[in-house]
Image (cartoon, helix red, strand yellow):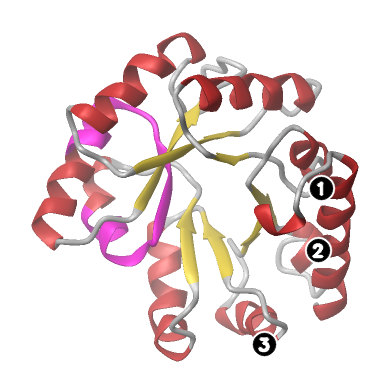
Amino acid sequence: MSAALAEVQARIAAAAHAASRDPAAVTLVAVSKTHGADRVEELLRAGQRVFGENRVQEAQAKFPELKTRYPDLELHLIGPLQTNKARDAVALFDVIESVDRPKLASELSREMAKQGKRPACFVQINTGEEEQKAGIAPGEADAFIRACIEEHKLPVVGVMCIPPADEEPALHFALLAKIAQRNGLKQISMGMSADYETAVRFGATHVRVGSALFGARGVAA
């Protein structure tokens, strides 16, 4: 796995240089969903410190003990968040990348105030306006981001998207970058194993890479 990590890091660096960007400005989020704590620890031993999980319950089973042993581990929630899991998400995650509706924003705000813990937030944009996919519509993004910051007092630092699988991702990455820019947000989470180099060229500050690091789900890399 250390070889896979080195290869992904090298590709990120090459894509950043090609876009006249500093590779250090791009954070690799290792997507560890469906992989056990032992696989996560392999990457931790290789030096990786930022991980992404899709489900609160799965992350709760793996990461509390790892966080105790690796205090600099940073955990991102990158999957849809049910409102009734907001309390657990605030308690466990350092970053919540999937803020996508007013009810969730309100609940996260309440939980942050209650727990005295403020994980950084990304607003998820449904750039392809796909009915089955989470995220706020692009046309509603500016007003929702403003409400998250001003009304709900959430620590919104950026935006996130998952482009449609059958469309050119560059178009969606460009759209997300524009939304971030006009809202004064510095962080952009976009790009996965198949397209993270393209995402870096379009300004991604975070790329979410799973299979290129871990291999196919449940299969040794």
Residue at the spot of label 3: 45
- Mark 3 or 2: in front is 2
Query: Disc 3 or 1, which lies upstream in sequence?
Result: 1
Indicate yes or no whether the magenta region holds residue 198. Answer: no
Residue annotated with mark 2: 9
Along the viewing direction, whichever of 178 and 169 lies nearer the viewer:
178
What distance separates the C-alpha of mark 3 from that of mark 2?
A: 15 Å
Does 220 appear above or below 116? below
Q: Position of residue 46 (x, y in %)?
A: 72, 83
**In the picture, residue 2 is in which quadrant?**
bottom right
The N terminus, quarter of image: bottom right
Q: Amino acid at mark 1?
A: Ala
**Which residue type carries mark 3?**
Arg
Q: x and y percent of residue 215 in the render?
A: 80, 65
Q: Which residue is mark 1?
A: 16
SS at mark 1 in the image: helix
Q: In the image, is 211 to the left or to the right of 175?
A: right
Magenta-highlighted residues: 87-106
Q: In the rendered view, tell whether residue 104 sits above or below residue 127.
A: below
Say which quadrant the C terminus sits in. bottom right
Residue at image x 31%, y 57%?
89
Tell me which label, 3 or 2, sits earlier in the chain.
Answer: 2
- In the rendered image, residue 104 lying in the magenta stretch gets the answer yes
Residue 159 to residue 30: above or below: above
Q: Tag 3, which secondary structure?
A: helix
Q: Answer yes or no: is residue 134 visible.
A: no
